[in-house]
Image: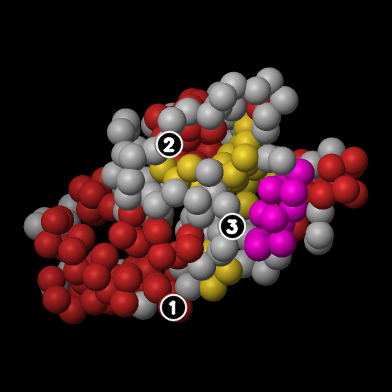
Amino acid sequence: MTIPAHESPPAPAAPNESSRALLLDLDGVLLDTRPVMRKAWQRVQEIHGVALPFRDYERHLGREFGDIMQRLGVTDAEAVRRTYEAESVATAHLAEEFAGIDETLHAFVAADWRLGVVTSKHVDRAAPLLARLGCPFATVRTPAGAGRTKPAPDPLLLALVDLGVDPASAVYVGDMAVDQESAARAGVPYVHAGWGYGQPTAPDPETASSPRELLSLLPAKQLVEGSTV
């Protein structure tokens, strides 16, 4: 990751009609963070007496935490957030990279694609997880930045401004219905991560069953010359 997600984004990259961008969600796409989220929710249940099971929280993944709390009817949402985030940071070591994700990302870098992350995970939880990947993400958009959160198109469009890439020349990889909706509203082609947590909605999007299948997005020449997978 080349920029800390908690800092202001860089000046927009110079426009280049040949530039391509691969934008990715974090949870369920880059890393399997379900064990971390489950532990954090258990801590919320213990401290705040929240009776809702984890599956109710999980159903809304992809949305910003405060949005989820509102949808679940959880009161004192800020106190719950602090507990959830502290436990998430403490148990971040439980997250694991999905098989093949690191090699796939480096293949896109070698093929001169610009990489970015668009996540509804707050910066304190996202930054240490992304740092583990050792990949040069040119932009990281979290709810700490400007604009509305997913499923609004704002975070995707702002990420593309950072990268200097048109929506039609980008791809967003997500695993939840809000990711698909955000991409549609932004005019960005969407690929559903079949290895993630959610199911796509109509109209059926292109689906990759594994991170390595994303390499099909690379032209054959780039794949031969640039990929190490």
Q: Is residue 25 left or right of residue 102?
A: left
What SS does tag 3 mark?
loop
Q: Return the disc, 1 or 3, that comes first in the chain's sequence.
A: 1
Give the number of marks: 3
Q: Measuring 54% from the left and 73% from the top, which residue is drawn there?
A: 96
Q: Gap between marks 3 and 2, in whole Å?
A: 17 Å
Magenta segment includes 151: no
Q: Which residues are magenta?
A: 101-111
* Residue at image location 81% in from the left, 59% down from the top: 228
Q: Amino acid at mark 3?
A: Cys
Q: Based on the picture, tell me whether residue 110 belongs to the magenta stretch.
A: yes
x, y percentage for residue 186? Answer: 50, 26
List the residue tagged with mark 3.
135
> Is residue 203 visible in the rendered structure shown here?
yes
Residue identified by numbered label 2: 10
Say whether residue 201 is visible: no
What amino acid type should be assigned to the residue bearing mark 1? His
Element marked by disc 2: loop
How far across and down, in percent of the image, does residue 224 sit? Answer: 90, 49
Depth order, front residue of 166/225: 225
The x, y position of residue 41, in whole percent, is 29, 70
* Residue hosting label 1: 93
Residue 143 vs residue 210: left or right? left
Categorize mark 2 by other alpha carbons within 10 Å: few (<14), some (14-19), many (20+): few
Residue mark closest to the camera, 1 vs 3: 3
| Nearest to the observer: residue 102 or residue 193 | 102
In which quadrant of the rendered view does residue 141 lie?
Answer: top left
Element carrying mark 1:
helix
Q: Quadrant of residue 100?
A: bottom right
